[in-house]
Image (cartoon, coloured by chain):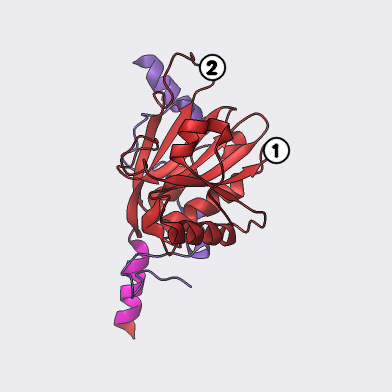
Chain colours: A red, B purple
Amino acid sequence: DSSESKKGGLASMLPHPLEHSWTFWYDNASGKSKQIAWGSSIRLIHTFNTVEDFWSLYNNIHHPSKLVNGADLYCFKHKIEPKWEDPVCANGGKWTITMTSRGKSDTIWLYTLLAMIGEQFDYGDEICGAVVNVRSRQEKVSIWTKNAFNEAAQISIGKQWKELVDYKEQIGFITHDDSMKLDKGAKIKYAV
Amino acid sequence: DVQFEDESTRKKKYSRDFLLTFSEQCKDLPEGFEMGADPDIITSVHAGMFRGDRDIL
């Protein structure tokens, strides 16, 4: 009826609130002294909590293909710092999709962001955020999670992520603990 | 398949297709945006503006 359509009209003009507030962070370690501790150059861009503000930010920041080599762009839940040391992340790990050439990650990055802020994951509460790492010969998109030992949650997130970004190849999950201790020698804990 | 508020979880859920419909409507930087980040991350039009601000400061 008319009251319903009026209500719908008004509702469509209001900002669409997200379940969580999210923060974009940016880091570009290239060109800086190696004496600078990892993560110390990371800078907060902005925090948003509506669909509209997400697009206002996304449309005004470079997409991965336009970022300089060495850049890391993060989108994490508000108040979770994108660092292994953050108490929420410390026992977690990450699923990673690696693209072995430059300029290929824009769509996967966008679809990952939309899946997270739109709460499309069954275990969304287990997710800390996502990061895209831009390097000279590859781009990596990762989803960070909270508890690496909650296997059911990790497997679910990994499988759903592949579906949500239309990715067909196998992906692996590595714990932050292993990444810290073993760096590139870290072993894959789960694969989907 | 928009589920503004999922009945079982009470979460505000939005499908990819629904979110994509807002892309063209939101072209300006969000209200309250402050340049705390490296200007390299901001696209050229705005980066120039912020670099100018920084030079003045």
Asked whether residue B33 is drawn in magenta, I would say no
Tell me which residue sits at (55%, 37%) in the image: A186
N-terminal of the pair, mark 2 or mark 1, is 2
The disc labelled 1 sits on which kind of residue?
Ser
Q: Position of residue A170 (x, y in %)?
A: 64, 53
| Residue furthest to the right | A101
* Secondary structure under the numbered disc 1 in the rendered image: loop
Position of A36 relative to B49 (above/below): above
The disc labelled 2 sits on which kind of residue?
Gly
Tell me which residue sits at (56%, 46%) in the image: A188
Q: Position of residue A98 (x, y in %)?
A: 63, 43
**Image quarter of the N terminus of chain A:** bottom left
Picture mark count: 2
**Mark 1, residue position:** A101
Q: Nearer the viewer, residue B29 or A187?
A: A187
Whether discs 2 and 1 lie on one chain: the answer is yes
Q: Which residues are magenta?
A: A3-15
**Mark 2, residue position:** A31
Q: Is residue B42 visible?
A: no
Mark 2, chain letter? A
